[in-house]
Amino acid sequence: MKNSPVLFPASIGWLIWVSLHLVFLQQHQVPLLPAIQDAVLFASILFLSAASISRVLKYYKPDWKKAIGFVVGNAAVATGVMSLYSWTANYFLKPGQKLTDLLPNAEVVLFTLSFLFLLCTGLIHWLWLTLKEREDDTKRKSDQETLARNAELNNLRQQLQPHFLFNSLNSIQALMELDPEKAREMLRLLSDFLRGTVKKEPTQLVSFEEEIKQVRLYLAIESIRFSDRLNIDWSVDDNTLSHKVPVLILQPIIENAVKFGLYGTTGPIRIRISARMNGDVLEVSTQNPFDSDTGTNQGTGFGLSSVARRLYLLYARNDLLSSKKENQQFIITIRIPS
């Protein structure tokens, strides 16, 4: 809706008016040149008046409560059209060469047609402006919602990264004295992990293969922290690797599995990560053991709630993350549509 819809129909109306006006005058033996002058003169005055009304409506758009004023205004313009036409026609044309000299009650007929033409073009333009205003409002609200959503996504991302970063730095600090070589390796892995995340927007989509690489870096860091206690089983179908997923959507889930699988236990644990396609939806599941007797391994912290919130903001769905407990195993499944 970039251009007003009034111009084209008004131009067609101008041509039709000139043609009918000209035909009528020719049928009354008015010479061709005066007939063209009279037809073009009246139609041009009417067209310019309609264009003026459209111009005014760009800056002053009456509401329905002022409809009577709008109608009266069009009637006043139609009166002005008739007055200007009569004055200019009397100046340029001889008696008997004007439509008003040949048609009984021509002034009334021309005034009525002029009024209806101006009213219709004005209403068309008013309707167009109203629709355009609503379209602009909708776009503005959509832009505002997008900005707010991106701000919230970015805020969630910023809250997640420090949590993981502080834990890793604390582990590196502890290893500096106990095992400097492992501390250096952990620092290198952390650097690689952060390098792959800091320049990415929270709304960015990456391939599942790239997301897995980031998760493997995270797990390598955690493996150094927990030594031989952390074991990972991967079961990833090849057709899932090209699927697009939100950046860093898996890391909080894997972190949740590590946290609630290892914390509160002293022995080794095994975390299972699987991925498969269900139609055009990628389903990723993590499974970790938990000790129901401790009462602490519930797996419902900020990490999971932030993932659920991100999925809702990106896909407008609340059913993309689910969790369940089964046989001393905590299972989380996320579904990522195409």
Image (cartoon, helix red, strand yellow):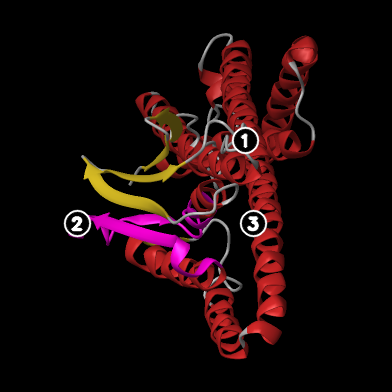
Q: Residue at x 69, y 29 (%)?
A: 81
Q: Kindly indicate the quadrant of the structure image that contains residue 168.
A: bottom right
- Asked if the residues shown at circle 3 and circle 1 are in contact, with their CB atoms under 8 angstroms apart, the answer is no
Viewer can see residue 172: yes
Q: Residue at x 62, y 20 (%)?
A: 119
Viewer can see residue 48: no
Q: Earlier in the sequence, mark 3 or mark 2?
A: 3
Callout 3 environment at 10 Å: few (<14), some (14 to 19), or many (20+)?
some
Q: Is residue 115 left or right of residue 166?
A: left
| Residue named by callout 2 | 239
Q: CA distance from mark 3 to mark 2?
A: 28 Å
Q: Earlier in the sequence, mark 1 or mark 2?
A: 1
| Residue named by callout 1 | 138
Residue in front for this viewpoint, 175 or 101: 175
When the figure is inspected, residue 192 is found, relative to residue 79, above or below; the finding is: below
Q: Is residue 261 left or right of residue 129?
A: left
| Residue named by callout 3 | 157
- Numbered range of the magenta stretch: 226-254
Residue 156 lies, in percent from the top left, at 67, 51
**Residue 236, numbered circle:** none
Residue 75 lies, in percent from the top left, at 72, 17
Mark 1 or 2, which is nearer the eye?
2
Q: CA distance from mark 3 to mark 1?
A: 28 Å
